[in-house]
Image (cartoon, rainbow, N blue to C red):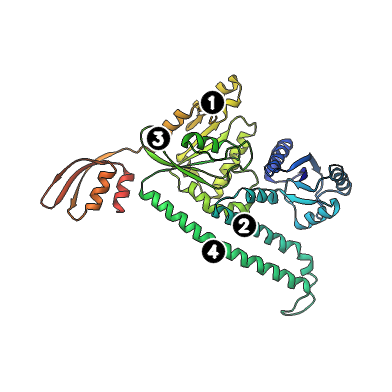
Amino acid sequence: MRTLVLHPVRHGSRHASSQRDPSDALAEAVSLSEALDLEIVGAEVVPVPKARAATLFGTGKLAELGERVTEGEAGLVIVDGPLSPVQQRNLEKAWKAKVLDRTGLILEIFGDRARTREGVLQVELAHLSYQKSRLVRSWTHLERQRGGVGFLGGPGETQIEADRRALDEKIVRIRQALGKVVRTRGQHRAARARLDYPIVALVGYTNAGKSTLFNRLTGASVLAKDMLFATLDPTMRAIDLPGGRRVILSDTVGFISDLPHQLVAAFRATLEEVLDADLILHVRDISHHESEHQAENVRAILGELGLGQEALGRLIEVWNKVDALDPEQAEATRQIAARTQRTHVISALTGDGVPELLAAIQSDLTEPARDETLRLGFDQGRRRAWLFDHDLVTSERQTEMGYEMAVRWTERDRSQFDTL
């Protein structure tokens, strides 16, 4: 579909993206649109000295943009920012084209990318929550025209209530279905815990190179494109670290500035993998001139998910795409990283720095081991077998009461053993 992309800059706005360079924000909006294979016929930054409640833009600018829509034969206009339902409806009437705001665009992309049942349900839930909030506001003028008394209202309110009830029923059904999927995911998580495989989660701004790194470490073939939101559903694989330790690597959905709150809520279950992770790799596109701004957005969303300051001890920053820098920039970046704790410079594309990153992961997940003597009865064969299966027994002798076993294990091993 032929599409015109607009990035409004509101004077005095406290909107999160208002601190960004408008041209950078516009470029990201274009990339988001291209992620849906839309044909971009124009893109521009539009100053908004005073936001109009009915149309956002003033009369003159509205007409000027309408000419752009007509000249470009655009059937869709993306407004990279929030629009009220009234503004969206009035703009569509004025321009005779479909209009989507930033939240609507991101929801469309997520809907297009979802593949697993959980992903599809989460996107649908986010869509319905978005529709419901807009339905309530968009019908406010009809509610004021209420024509009856008591429980009797005018036709406008009757329609609102019917639509609202239909959305509520769909939301309840989806939440019930999602609850079952989430419980299954919890069971899988518990099963992995019993296997004593640490979880290493990849997080980062969309298009930072997480999937490329995931593929290099696992040998998998996860979709890895120079495209925003190339990965939506989380993917998990087991890998063996250089020291022989097996871990579960989890690739997650990319974050983005001004992520719709409906999606933060809807994807909480998926991103719980991050909260439960033993180690978090924050992958950054260090070649991007907005890398620090992107990193701040990731930290903010992790905070919304409940990841506090105490989690910084299990987070490693991975400065990716060093291959995209010129030699002098690359060397300067490595020197800065060397002075920064828990930071590694890599190229997931070429493999540069990846062995050192794997060694750091191995070191981070290696707990100090201690020697201990256990006494197990003859009726504790399952626990004895578990110790041998995990290669924790250094010596054993049989006694009249059972087995006396010398073990060398970590606190994690001990905790796992105590649950048997």
Q: How far is mark 4 from mark 2, CA to CA?
A: 13 Å
Are the two marked residues, 1 and 4, in contact with CB atoms closer than 8 angstroms? no
Disc on the earlier residue, 1 or 4: 4
Tell me which numbered mark, 4 or 2, is placed earlier along the sequence: 2
Q: Nearer the viewer, residue 396 or 222?
A: 222
Spatial CA span between label 1 and label 2: 43 Å
Instruction: Report the front residue among 173 and 131.
Output: 173
Mark 1 against mark 2, which lies toward the viewer?
2
Q: Which residue is mark 2?
A: 124
Give how far across and how far down residue 121 sits, in percent. Answer: 58, 57
Secondary structure at numbered mark 4: helix
Q: Amino acid at mark 3?
A: Leu
Type of amino acid under label 1: Ile
Left or right: 381 as drawn, with respect to 240: left
* Disc 4 to disc 2: CB gap under 8 Å: no
Q: Earlier in the sequence, mark 3 or mark 4?
A: 4
Residue named by callout 1: 336
Picture coordinates of residue 181 (x, y %)? 50, 58
**Image quarter of residue 67:** top right
Q: Which mark is residue 241?
A: 3
- Between the residue at mark 2 and the residue at mark 3, the CA separation in whole angstroms equals 38 Å
